[in-house]
Image (cartoon, rainbow, N blue to C red):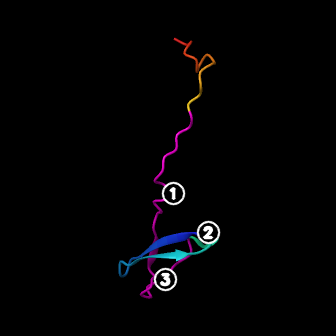
Amino acid sequence: MPRYEFRCRACGETFELSRPMAEANEPAECPNGHDDTVKLLSTIGVSGLAQAPRPAGGGCCGGGCCA
């Protein structure tokens, strides 16, 4: 089950909750009992960069025959 990080606007507490993806944007209560919380952006999903493999030579556009 995914874990989501939240921050309480009332007290500043940051906390995590495990919940189904279907409930990811549902309101969350902080451990101190406050209801004014916001879900934080996960850095795991946005931290990596993937690059597409470069085509190998052979064709006109990949073999270097174009000027």
Sequence-wise first label, 1 or 3: 3
Crowd around label 2: few <14 · some 14–19 · many ≥20 (10 Å): few
The residue beneath circle 3 is 29
Inter-mark Cα distance, 3 to 2:
17 Å
Sequence-wise first label, 3 or 2: 2
Q: Judging from the image, what secondary structure is the residue with disc 2 in?
A: helix
The amino acid on which the numbered mark 3 sits, given as a three-letter code, is Glu
* Pointer 1 with pointer 2, Cβ within 8 A: no
Q: Judging from the image, what secondary structure is the residue with disc 1 in?
A: loop
Q: Is residue 51 above or below residue 9?
A: above
The residue beneath circle 1 is 45
Question: Which disc is residue 21 wearing?
Answer: 2
Q: Measuring 38% from the left and 77% from the top, which residue is drawn there?
A: 9
Can you say which quadrant of the picture contains the N terminus? Answer: bottom right
Report the magenta residues as a range: 25-53
**Relative image position of residue 52 (x, y in whole percent):** 56, 37
Q: Measuring 62% from the left and 68% from the top, which residue is drawn there?
A: 21
The amino acid on which the numbered mark 1 sits, given as a three-letter code, is Gly
